[in-house]
Image (spheres, rainbow, N blue to C red):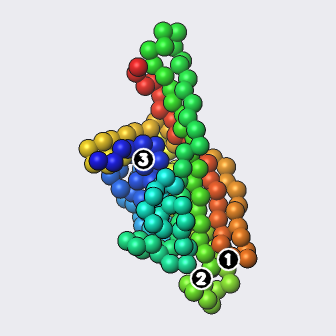
Amino acid sequence: MRYLDEVTYLINLLKGGGISLSKFTGTNTWAASATSQGASGHQVTPTIIDIRNMVKNKGARYDLSRAASGESSSDLIVVFEDGQSVDNPTIDWSVRNETYTLTVHIRCIHDERGASDANYARDRLENLYKIVKHRIDGNRRGATVTVGSESKRFDQIHLGNRTESNDRGKRIFGYKISIEMKKFAVPL
């Protein structure tokens, strides 16, 4: 059985799998978010991985020039946790508020898909970002994600700052995005 930690929660939220009790309006999937953002040509879900994955071509090294086995796109989204903080807002310490900070790296390569379009990778990256933003904003008031027999819910999810991370020489374009997830009044 796979443990549903914060990274696994966010990966499933981005993919659109096992989501219930969400305030999201419309179909809560990657493809529906792509269509909603005017990026219907980008409905194929990129490879979304947990950096702690030890499966070949799914963690430590990833070949952006071809899709990994079992995946439909060579584009990559990597998710990892930066930190957690706990606040005890009551005098008797009977509850706590938890804040998790995660980083999402979006990567795409200018490959044969963009042979006739000099801006293919740049446009693909922008559309991937719009879809990720739509997925987070649509579920910002929390959603319950279920993996196997375990469920997890957050009260708030915030999209933080975005920085560029490009390597023109290798034709790789990317964004680094911070995400903050909060749980309030967790009983002890």
- Kindly identify the residue that appears in the image at 45 percent across and 72 percent down: 68
Find out whether the residues at labels 1 and 2 contact each other: C-beta distance under 8 Å: yes
- Kindly identify the residue that appears in the image at 43 percent across and 25 percent down: 186
Residue located beneath label 1 in the image: 171
Residue located beneath label 2 in the image: 111
Q: Is residue 128 left or right of residue 11?
A: right
Relative to 153, say whether 136 is above or below.
Answer: below
- Kindly identify the residue that appears in the image at 70 percent across and 61 percent down: 164
Relative to 139, say whether 114 is above or below.
Answer: below
Q: Where is residue 117 drawn, in percent x and y?
A: 64, 86
Q: Where is residue 55 drawn, in percent x and y?
A: 43, 62
Q: Secondary structure at mark 3?
A: helix
Mark found first going from the N terminus, 1 or 3: 3
Q: How many marks?
A: 3
In the image shown, does 40 or 102 lie closer to the viewer?
A: 102
Q: Residue furthest right?
A: 169
Find the distance from the CA under tag 1 to the CA under tag 2.
Answer: 8 Å
Q: Where is residue 3 drawn, in percent x and y?
A: 36, 44
Q: Is residue 40 left or right of residue 116?
A: left
Q: Where is residue 111 drawn, in percent x and y?
A: 59, 82
Mark found first going from the N terminus, 1 or 2: 2
What amino acid is at disc 2?
Answer: Asp
Q: Is residue 17 left or right of residue 92?
A: left
